[in-house]
Amino acid sequence: MDIYEYAMQMERDGEDLYRDLAGRTANKGLQNILIMLADAEVRHYKLFQNMKNNGKLIMADTSILNEVRNVFVKMKEEKSFEVDVSHIELYRKAQEIEKTTQDFYEEKAGETQDKSQAGIFLKIADEEKRHYFILESIIDFVNRPASWLENPEWYHLEEY
């Protein structure tokens, strides 16, 4: 399996994981966040598909952190604190996968001679890092929803 096929499979697996997690939670806000993460994995998949086919290598900036922040604000306004604590281990597993994926893309960026491709690998690695911190925010929220949403500084959703 070549590097692009491998990366595409990782992204497909990530999408499946996030859609599965979204289906397991009853909280609409968390469902929306998990679907956003799944959709980001689809964008990554398509980018690697283009790279494999020597297509156009353009990766638009993402606004996922702002979108996630808006979902949490809406949850706060609606006092939507109902969450399933039993899913924490699933979120931690997803977080581990994001870290492994980030490391993989950083490694591949260092191996390629094509500066454009290296830049794409690094940009996707940076997005995977954001996904890791989004999952960290979900874990924090699930552990203590009322106090987490009341925090006025929102330090847990900084731009990375």
Image (tube, rainbow, N blue to C red):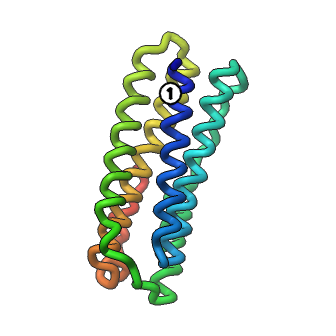
Q: Is residue 43 left or right of residue 22?
A: right
Q: Is residue 17 depicted above or below 151 in this figure? A: above
Mark 1 Cα shell of 10 Å, populated few (<14), some (14-19), many (≥20): few
Q: Is residue 158 left or right of residue 17?
A: left
Q: Is residue 7 depicted above or below 158 in this figure? A: above
Q: Nearer the viewer, residue 79 or 19?
A: 19
Question: Can you name the residue that lies furthest to the right here?
Answer: 55
Counting from the top left corner in percent of width and height, residue 60 is at 64, 41
Counting from the top left corner in percent of width and height, residue 33 is at 51, 64
Q: Nearer the viewer, residue 149 or 29?
A: 29
Q: Is residue 63 depicted above or below 30 in this figure? A: above
Give the total of numbered labels.
1
Counting from the top left corner in percent of width and height, residue 44 is at 58, 39
**Residue on which the image places disc 1:** 6
Q: Residue at x 44, y 36 (%)?
A: 125
Q: Nearer the viewer, residue 130 or 158?
A: 130
Query: Amino acid under label 1?
Result: Tyr
Q: Residue at x 48, y 14 (%)?
A: 112
Q: Residue at x 48, y 70 (%)?
A: 30
Counting from the top left corner in percent of width and height, residue 140 is at 30, 69
Q: Residue at x 44, y 40 (%)?
A: 126
Query: In the picture, residue 46 is in which quadrant?
Result: top right
